Image (tube, helix red, strand yellow):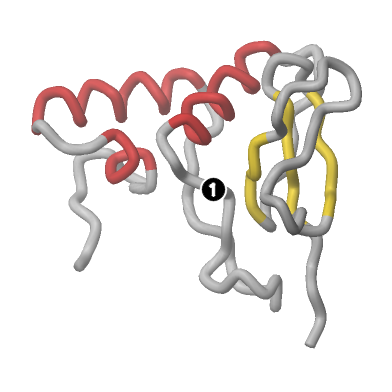
Amino acid sequence: MTCYKLHYVCVSCRVGFKRHPHPRGEHRCPNCDRTLLCAGHDFAAPPGRDARGWSVVAAVLGAGLRYEGLTACGCGKAPKYRPRTRADLRARRRVAAREGLPLAQVLSRPDPLTPTPC
């Protein structure tokens, strides 16, 4: 069985790394020594100069979501939807507040107004 590396990010430094899962559960940023956040197998980091893109990444990871496909093995399945722009993030925050839903549930919808099937 192959153990694929996960993407870990430091949102404050705007950097990402691919690492094997740490046995003790945490990796440290080489720049600032903060704990890296696990972003999943299918994460594509925005450029370091893209502060808006990184703010969306911080919101998605802060909601407890990761950038994963249908399976965690990386076998070519399509990745699940995650917002990429601040406009997408704002629209989903408004829907979550209006409908009283958890933000993580609304962030994973391709269309914020369409409920996810159970």
Q: Position of residue 30 (x, y in %)?
A: 90, 26
Which image quadrant for residue 69? bottom right
Residue at x 18%, y 52% (from the top left corner): 115
Q: Is residue 69 left or right of residue 21?
A: left
Q: Residue at x 48, y 19 (%)?
A: 86
Amino acid type shown at disc 1? Arg
| 33 up-or-down from 8: above or below | above
Name of the residue lying farthest toward the left: 99
Residue 73 screen position, x and y as percent: 67, 75
Looking at the image, residue 6 lies above or below residue 37: below
The residue identified by callout 1 is 66
Viewer-closest of 60 and 91: 60
16 horizontally vs 36: left or right: right
Tell me the residue at 10%/25% (across/down). Answer: 98
Query: Which secondary structure lies at badge 1?
Result: loop
Quick one: 29 or 90, which is closer to the camera? 29
The number of callouts visible is 1
Compared with 29, 78 (above or below) is: below
